[in-house]
Image (cartoon, rainbow, N blue to C red):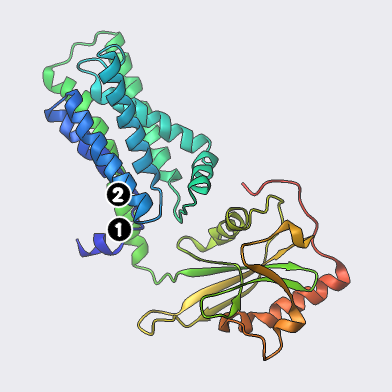
Amino acid sequence: MEFLLKHKDKIVSFGLLPTIITLIGLHFFPTTEMLGVGLVISITALLYDIFHLKGLNFFLLQGTIGIGLCFFLRVFYGYQYVPLNGITPALEFMLLIFASIHVIAPDIYFFLLKKLRLTSRFSYILEARTIFALSAIHLIILQIMISRHAPLSENWRFFMGNVIPVSIYILCLIANITGIRMAAKYDILKIVIRIAPLCCDKLLLVRREDNKWDLPVIRTYNGALRKADSFAERLVEDFLHYKKRIPLMMVQSYTASHPNPDCFPLKTQLYILPVENISDVTVPGGEYVPIDKIMEKSFPKAERLYKELLQIWMVSDVWKEMGTPPVIKKKLR
């Protein structure tokens, strides 16, 4: 239990809990009222995730929409679309549709995150693919058995129609927990991603709460090191709203002490974003400041920026001689 509480933010399949509760409830009470109870639980969890945790768990969203559709179809159309003994397979089919959409077009989820100004550090693709594959196989087998009028005992009907769907989601939850538990055995540090928009010899900075200037994009990344570059590219579009595809340059990787002395040092990766024109990339309260001015001792700058200035200055000097990297006319995602 202590492990689950410690890593609850990393176990993305916790978003499946309202769906699992609803499916189990439908085993005992296969009624419209049980769907309504499941919908209330899902909406409550989704609102808590959005307004309190400032995130948007895909599986919470998937379950809320799927359960909601089944509930309203049953309320307004009776048994026309959701048969009397087919409420669980109907819900499984709804969830399968949304899982397949996320597998085929994950950009829709990221677009929704951007519109709601929310962030997500985790990927749901693996679990969504698992749900898509297992649910598709189960529903195809179920459809074949129904179309051929295969003689089944009451226990087999209950197993095929009710036990297997909830087992698929429980399996995803267990697999997710097991994966996080295995990953927790390794000493993996969080990575701080810092992005420095650089135009000629000017660096885009913002003034922080301590009245010192620092880089405009600073985010903590939790995940595989090989995917840190992709995460940084996504930040460019989400927070700097820069649609042009620019080859980000990871120019420095270092370990910095954590502000809290009880915490481990944080691995930091500095990326430089080449900007063609100052008007291309702007942020509220941001200002392009000449690097020579930033390097002056009297200029109020963050400690980390002070450590990074030499690398930024060297890149700027090279770009003066060689020119900035070319823009690739392609979106980031």
Q: Mark 1 belongs to which amino acid? A: Lys
Disc 1 packing (10 Å; few <14; some 14–19; many ≥20): some
Q: Gap between marks 2 and 1, in whole Å? A: 8 Å
Res 8 label: 1
Give the image location of residue 235, x and y in percent.
Answer: 58, 57
Whole-percent x and y of residue 206?
61, 71
Q: Residue at x 61, y 77 (%)?
A: 213
Q: Looking at the image, can residue 138 be seen?
A: no
Does residue 268 lie above or below 166 as drawn? below
Q: Does 283 appear above or below 27?
A: below
Instruction: Determine the residue positioned at 72% across, 56% down.
Output: 246
Q: Is residue 156 visible?
A: yes
Mark 2 or 1, nearer chain start: 1
Circles 2 and 1, Cβ within 8 Å, touching? The answer is yes
Element under disc 2? helix
Q: Quadrant of residue 275?
A: bottom right
Disc number placed over residue 14 in the picture, else none: 2
Please identify the residue farthest to the bottom as the structure is shown: 297
For residue 324, side relative to residue 197 (left or right): right
**Is 277 situated above or below 187?**
above
Q: Nearer the viewer, residue 211 or 291?
A: 211
